[in-house]
Amino acid sequence: MWGVAATKLICFDCDSTLSALEGIDELARRRGPAVLAEVAAMTNDAMNGQVPVESVFGRRLEIIQPRREDVAAVGRRYVETVEPTAQATLAELRSRGWTTVIVSGGFTAAIQPLADLLGVTRIEAVGLTFAADGAYRGYAAEFPTARSGGKPEVIARLRRELQPVVTVMVGDGVSDLETQPGVDRFIGFGGYVTRPRVQAEAGAFIHSLAELTRIL
């Protein structure tokens, strides 16, 4: 549809899209079942659009108090739970002239190993800070994806910078669906979790990333 020489931008959510993992929940799991249950409930409410992302973002981290080594461990889990067709699909898309970017409300340091595996050189996600001993100090609260409406801001910035002829967003959550007015095509993903609102409102809905090579 679009010439190979033109810049085409495709952005992917990370959690429950490029990987089966919800990174924040995996961090919580390392603190035991009670913490996991509390944090997972908050995550689910935010992903389904029942509460604003910013109302739970910092609170979950305060509860978990993730250490640097916890984040590294979750990074390894992202790789272990990669979506089965992601590596081949993203490589195929790049061969067709697509620029691949991860746009996530997750944490850059945890996502980096997965991005490396998938050949994605740009991550737009939230930074974490740690003390010298590895203890949690805080997060980049000013980064757009730490709040509702943040992913559309990131997409708009990428479009201004890269000037793509077409922009696509792929993701499973309501925060991803929010990008729909600012992209040429929003594709909902239900390979791990099917969120009714996303399925109902997405321009297209897939259950395997391999489907992208057919519909794009």
Image (spheres, rainbow, N blue to C red):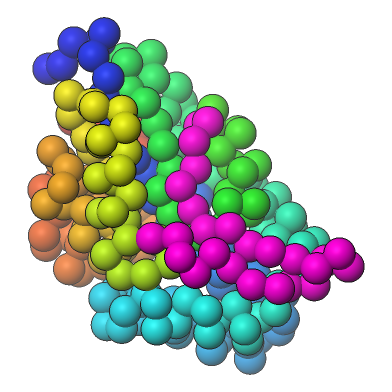
Could you say where residue 209 lies in the image, as x and y percent from the top left?
35, 38
Q: Nearer the viewer, residue 16 or 119?
A: 119
**Measuring 88% from the left and 67% from the top, which residue is drawn there?**
133
Q: Is residue 98 above or below residue 159?
A: above
Quarter in which the N terminus is drawn:
top left
Q: Hey, which quadrant is residue 72 in on the image? A: bottom right
Quarter in which the C terminus is drawn:
top left
Could you say where residue 167 lies in the image, as x and y percent from the top left?
22, 34
**Measuring 49% from the left and 69% from the top, which residue is drawn there?**
141
**Measuring 36% from the left and 26% from the top, which residue is drawn there?**
99
Q: Is residue 216 above or below residue 66?
A: above
Q: Is residue 126 above or below residue 211?
A: below
Residue range corresponding to the magenta coloring: 120-144
> Can residue 24 be seen?
yes
Q: Residue furthest right?
A: 133
Q: Is residue 21 above or below residue 169?
A: below
Q: Hey, which quadrant is residue 86 in on the image? A: top left
> Can residue 216 be seen?
no
**Measuring 52% from the left and 58% from the top, which residue is drawn there?**
126
Residue 21 lies in magenta, yes or no?
no
Q: Nearer the viewer, residue 57 or 14?
A: 57
Q: Nearer the viewer, residue 164 or 16?
A: 164
Could you say where residue 108 lies in the image, as x and y percent from the top left?
58, 51
Could you say where residue 59 lies in the image, as x and y percent from the top left?
53, 85
Residue 136 lies in magenta, yes or no?
yes
Q: Is residue 88 left or right of residue 111?
A: left
Q: Is residue 20 left or right of residue 175?
A: right
Count of labels in the image: 0
Q: Is residue 123 left or right of residue 148?
A: right
